Amino acid sequence: MLVAPSILSADFGHLARDVEAICDGGCDLVHVDVMDGHFVPNLTIGPVVVEAVAKAATKLLDIHLMVENNTFFVDLFAPLAPGYISFHIEEEKHPHRLIQKIRGLGIKPAIVLNPHSRPESIEFLLEDLDMVLLMSVNPGFGGQKFIPSVIEKAKRMKDLVEKRNPKCLIEVDGGVNDKNVHDLKAAGVDVVVAGSYVFKHENIAKAIESLKV
Ligand SMILES: O=C(CO)[C@H](O)[C@H](O)COP(=O)(O)O
């Protein structure tokens, strides 16, 4: 399992220190939650702060857009050369066009599904994606309870990925811990995002290690 700690749960007064701690602690990606106060009822960070995160990070950034105007935000963050940019299918009228734009900028495109969205809704986009992100909480806040139906959804997503594009990774985000990560692994999930579990743990490296099942 690859591990992408979400810096949403970091101490923003010591952000560079916390980003260094997860990178030194063995994370695979640094997950960055960008919220605009419109698509979700929360506001987080913009390019100035994400640039500071990128400077402190020794791993690739995995930027998760929770915004209304995806194209505007892709243009805003592309100069920081993240590894991945993911956008919500629920908020994009022209997902195929946006995937091409992200790839054209040298970034791996990913699509996010909210808890209610069906895996089949993106079946014909899978061959153009590097990753699919399944939300296991309602987007907007860290520290929420894991929604167990994501396990069945991940299995269905895995079947579709195997059929359409076996190289496409499946990522799950929200309420992930050292208990439910085993069910996620068995369902075919490749990457977990974990915020509060990692940053509230007394030892960040051990927390990351415990998710590498
Ligand atoms: O996208 C998110 C919220 O929209 C966060 O990445 C997610 O909730 C991770 O935090 P936690 O592990 O505390 O649930």
Image (tube, rainbow, N blue to C red):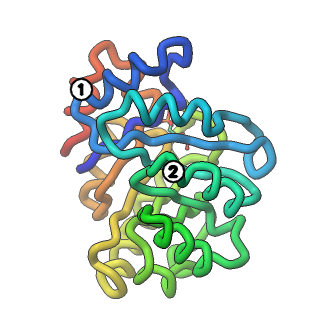
Q: Name the kind of residue labelled 2 in the image.
A: Ser
Within 8 Å: ligand 1 and the Cβ of disc 2? yes
Is residue 134 or residue 55 the one in the foreground?
55
Q: Quadrant of residue 168?
A: bottom left
Is residue 45 or residue 119 the one in the foreground?
45
Identified at 28% across, 64% down, the residue is 188
Residue under label 2: 136
Please, which residue is most extreme toward the right here? 38
Identified at 53% across, 38% down, the residue is 145
Within 8 Å: ligand 1 and the Cβ of disc 1? no
Please, which residue is most extreme toward the front here? 79
Q: Residues within 10 Å of mark 2 (few under 14, many from 20)?
A: many
Give how far apart the Cα atoms at labels 2 and 1 are. 27 Å
Identified at 68% across, 60% down, the residue is 70
Question: Residue 123 location in percent, x, y?
Answer: 49, 83
Question: Residue 153 location in percent, x, y?
Answer: 45, 66
- 136 relative to 204 in the view: left or right: right
Comparing labels 2 and 1, the label whose residue is closer to the camera: 1
Question: Residue 60 location in percent, x, y?
Answer: 35, 45
Residue under label 1: 24
Identified at 33% across, 65% down, the residue is 169
Is residue 81 or residue 99 the one in the foreground?
81
In terms of secondary structure, where does tag 2 sit?
A: loop
2 or 1: tag closer to the N-terminus? 1
In this rendering, the answer to whether 204 lies above or below 78 is: above
In this rendering, the answer to whether 29 lies above or below 22 is: below
Q: Quadrant of residue 154?
A: bottom left
Q: Name the kind of residue labelled 1 in the image.
A: Asp
